[in-house]
Image (cartoon, rainbow, N blue to C red):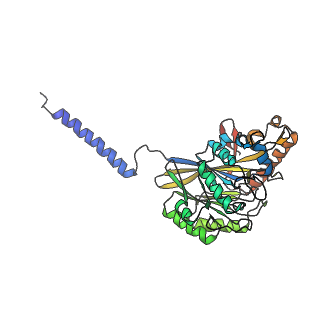
Amino acid sequence: MPMISGVKPLNMFKKALQGLFFTCLMTSLYGQEIGKSEQKFSLLFIGDIMGHDTQIWAAENTATHTYDYNEVFSYIKPVISEADVAIANFEVTLAGPPYKGYPQFSSPAAFAVACRNAGIDYLVTANNHAVDRGKNGIIGTIERLDSIGMPHTGTFFDQKAKENLQPLIIRKNGISVALLNYTYGTNGINVPKPVIINMLDKNLVTSDIVKAKSLNPDVVLLFLHWGTEYDTIPSQSQIDLAEYFFSQGVDLIIGSHPHVLQKMVWYKERNKAVVFSLGNFVSNQRKPKTDGGSMVRIELAKNGNTVTITDAGYYLTWVYTPLVKYRLRFFILPCSEFENRPDFFVNPADYAQMKKFINDSRSLLYKQNINIREYLLKGNSRLLNK
């Protein structure tokens, strides 16, 4: 029987329509394109970046009177750069010369440049040393960070600047984070008007959280300068504030100031996490427990409109200060990479001191942490310490 003209093309057209209808139906049922994968975002939190006199002297080229801090971060840079975004507490001012350490810090701007070069993406600047050099110090810090393209939050020129710039919104891989930063105080030094340093006032923070949430970020993050110096146990005030801020819709709370490690908790069922104190990242504090700290990595994933914490862990870090040609030098070491390398250290006493820091830190955090374990570096891999 001869084929009637047009019948075969018509059947092919019907099949194409059926396929298109099925694709549209599946998209409608599942609310997203077939095969679309979840979005992921890793955050790395870094503790107190301090600038004592010996650190300034170590960074100085005495012939040219210029400064270079890049070697400080040379061993830790690969770990920092591996995260999508790294945020650190910058606990010095960039007020210009005379450069000085404790008790009223002013470091060369090269310090911040080295932070940027090491892979740190954002700095928080609200801490108890923010007013060490007065109004000019606050303004100078803001201007110098802006001049090198380093985003920051916590201190502002005035109220208008705060309203325009806070919260600091971080966007990466389709996930948005609203960052807010506050300090418990400024060592009794009054904050000169019109500059603003965010103070850890419960009502103020609550109001700022409301504003942040009105922008519909996926995550609200508080970076808080709080707690009791050199105390490895969070104060009741820290615990109460954390619970209160969680009740107001905060998702992540990261703490600095005590200069020692405090516990870290990932509330899996609530999809929230708090790190009470990261400890020191770099400083010349050499007493037990102050000569190192942690970097905490938190991984987020987004499916549809829901963002969840999918992993959380920490790296122990230690500050190595060998004496080279009559001058101390500073290097931040990832502990797990160097804990079995005694030959690396010029002085066996330095290796012993690092091992003590590692053992003390593990003893504390293994007992107190909840759901946040240590990451160990093995070559190019990151493994959980079981």
Question: 300 or 106: which is nearer to us?
Answer: 106
The answer to whether residue 331 shows anywhere in this view is no
357 vs 231: above or below: above
Determine the residue positioned at 56% across, 63% down: 162
Q: Position of residue 263 (x, y in %)?
A: 72, 57
Determine the residue positioned at 40% across, 46% down: 33
Which residue ends up furthest to the top in the rendered image?
2
Q: Position of residue 308 (x, y in %)?
A: 55, 54
Question: 376 or 180: which is nearer to us?
Answer: 180
Q: Position of residue 94 (x, y in %)?
A: 68, 53
The answer to whether residue 220 shows anywhere in this view is yes
| 180 on left or right of 225 | left
The quadrant holding residue 18 is top left
Question: 86 or 159: which is nearer to us?
Answer: 159
Determine the residue positioned at 71% across, 65% down: 186
Determine the residue positioned at 32% across, 47% down: 24
Q: Quadrant of the N terminus?
A: top left
- Disc count in the image? 0
Q: Position of residue 50 (x, y in %)?
A: 74, 53
53 vs 197: above or below: above
| 31 on left or right of 303 | left
Which residue ends up furthest to the bottom in the rendered image?
203
103 vs 53: above or below: below
